[in-house]
Amino acid sequence: MSKSNPSIIIGALFALIAVILGAFGAHALKDSLIHNDSTETWKTAVDYQMWHALALILCGLVSTGKRLSLVCVCCFTVGILLFSGSLYWLSLDGPRWLGPITPLGGISLITGWACLIIEALSKRSNKAHE
């Protein structure tokens, strides 16, 4: 039996949570989000969490097992927590000091995509040399 790739598990967990938070925002928190005029912010948080959960799963599929694989997973994980996490909290009228944290999460997500591109190209290059 093969060992499970942690990034696939982490990605699937983030995807599951995104579905739950999307439904929660559309139903249980609907009035609160409308009152705070933050429905779109909540939806953005859910969308970005889902897309980057899928990116984590993709990391697991293209992983070469090198250090860059771990950097990629860490960047996406931190990015989801900072970007989507701060948007969720701000949507619920959280402290405004969280606003500057959101772009840090965005930078982490961008870095994760760059690492994923390099990882995929590295894997392709390694196959060409075999």
Image (cartoon, grey):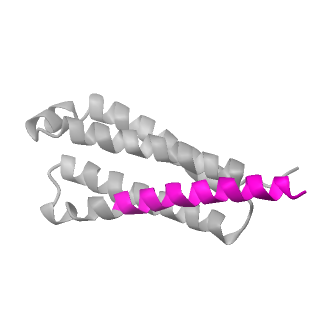
Question: Which is the main secondary structure of the residues drawn in magenta?
Answer: helix
The residue shown at (15%, 38%) is 32
Q: Where is residue 43 drawn, in percent x and y?
A: 29, 37
Along the line of sight, the residue nearer the viewer: 62 or 23:
62
Give the quadrant of residue 3.
Answer: bottom right
Residue 26 visible within the image: yes
Q: Would residue 126 be counted in the magenta stretch?
A: yes
Along the line of sight, the residue nearer the viewer: 119 or 9:
119
Q: Where is residue 120 drawn, in percent x and y?
A: 67, 53
**Rendered position, 17 above or below 30:** below
The residue shown at (20%, 46%) is 91
Q: Would residue 78 be counted in the magenta stretch?
A: no
Along the line of sight, the residue nearer the viewer: 14 or 121:
121
Q: Which residues lie in the magenta part? A: 105-130
**In the image: residue 103, left or right of residue 73:** left
Along the line of sight, the residue nearer the viewer: 121 or 111:
121
Total numbered circles: 0
Q: Where is residue 11 drawn, in percent x and y?
A: 56, 48
Give the quadrant of residue 34.
Answer: top left
The residue shown at (48%, 47%) is 52
**In the image: residue 78, left or right of residue 103:** right
The residue shown at (59%, 54%) is 117
* Quadrant where the image shows the C terminus: bottom right
Q: Where is residue 105 drawn, in percent x and y?
A: 36, 60
The residue at the far bottom in this view is 67
